[in-house]
Image (cartoon, rainbow, N blue to C red):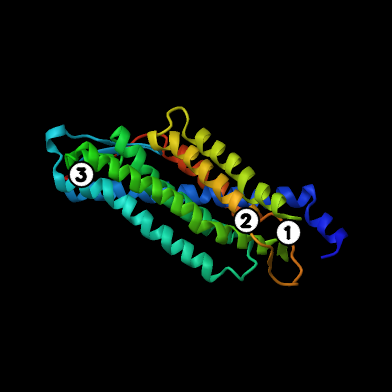
Amino acid sequence: MEESEINTKLSRKYFWAIVANSTTAYILAFLSVFYLNHFLKILLTGLFDYPITFTYDTIYFLIENYEWTHDSVRLIYSAGPLLMLVLGIISLVLFINMSDEPGRMKIFFVWFSLHAFNFVFSGLVIGNILTYGIGHVFNWMYLHDTMKMLVALIGFFGLLLSAIVVTKPIATSALSYFNRLDENNSPFFIMSQIIVPFLLGAGTILVFFLPEIPIQEKYSWIVLGVLLIIVSGRINSMEPMPFDLEERKVGVSWPVLIFTIVVLLALRFGLENSISISWGG
C-alpha cells in the first residue's frame, strides 16, 4: 500500500466514518439482545397467567410471592439467557461465513455475539451475587455457597473465552475498510472499530435507561470494557493480516444509522408509560 494511500485511510474523516458504523452496530446489537430477552420474558408469563405491567426497561409481576412456582421461575428467568447463548453462537457463525465480504455493517454480528455472551456470562456472576435475573433460578434451587461459587467461575471463564473467540472475527472486520491489518493501521482500527464505539455506545445505552438503570446494565458495560481491552491487546499483537487488493470505500451507512436512531427513540418513548397485560382475561 502506498504511503499516501495509508495516510488517506488513516484520516480523521475515515476514523469517524468507521466509528459511526461500529457505534450504530453496537447500539442496535445491544437493543436486539436486551429486547429479545425482555419480550420473551413477557410472553412466557402468559403460560402461567401472571398479570404484568412493563415499560421500556422493567417488567412488574402483579402477583404475590407465594404464586411463584419452581417451573415458572426456571422458565421465565432462564429461557432468555439460553436463547441469547444460542443466538450469540449463531451470530458469530454468520459473521465467520461472511468474513470475506467487505460489508461495513457485518460488524453488527460480532457486537451481537459479544452483547449476548456478556448478557449470559456476566449474568451468571452478577445475578448470582445480587439474586437478579437468572440468579432467581439459583436462589430457588437452594444452591449452597460452593455451587454458587462454581456458577460464578463458569461465568468468569465464559467471559474470558468470549474475548478469545471474538478476537479474530473482530480483526477480520478490518477487511471492510483496509486491504491489510498491520502495525501501520492496527491502533487506528482498534480505536475506531472497538474502543470509541464502545465508549459512545455504552454511554448512549446508559443515558437511554435513565433515570433508573437496570441492575445488570449498571455493571455489565464495565465487564464488556474489560473484555474489549483483552481483545484489543490480542489484536495488537497479531501477525499482519493481508486481505485483498480491491479498493475500499469508507463511508457512513446512513440508512442503518437513521434506522437505529428511530428504533432507539421509539423504544424509549413508546414504552415509557406502563403497558398492562392480564393473560387470564
Q: In what element is the residue under mark 1?
A: loop
- Label 3 or label 2, whichever lies nearer to me, is 3
> How far apart, in angstroms, are the residues tagged by discs 2 and 1?
15 Å
Please, is residue 3 above or below residue 223 in the view? below
Q: Residue at left 38%, top 51%?
A: 36
Residue 243 lies in quadrant: bottom right
Give the residue type at disc 3: Val
Is any part of residue 225 visible from this angle? yes
Nearer to us: label 2 or label 1: 1
Q: Is 24 placed left or right of 222 in the picture? A: right
Q: Quadrant of the N terminus?
A: bottom right
The residue pinned by badge 1 equals: 250
Hey, what amino acid is under mark 2?
A: Pro
Check disc 2: other Cα within 10 Å, few if <14, some if 14-19, many if 20+. Answer: few
Badge 2 element: helix
Residue linked to disc 3: 73
Query: Badge 2 is on which residue?
Result: 255
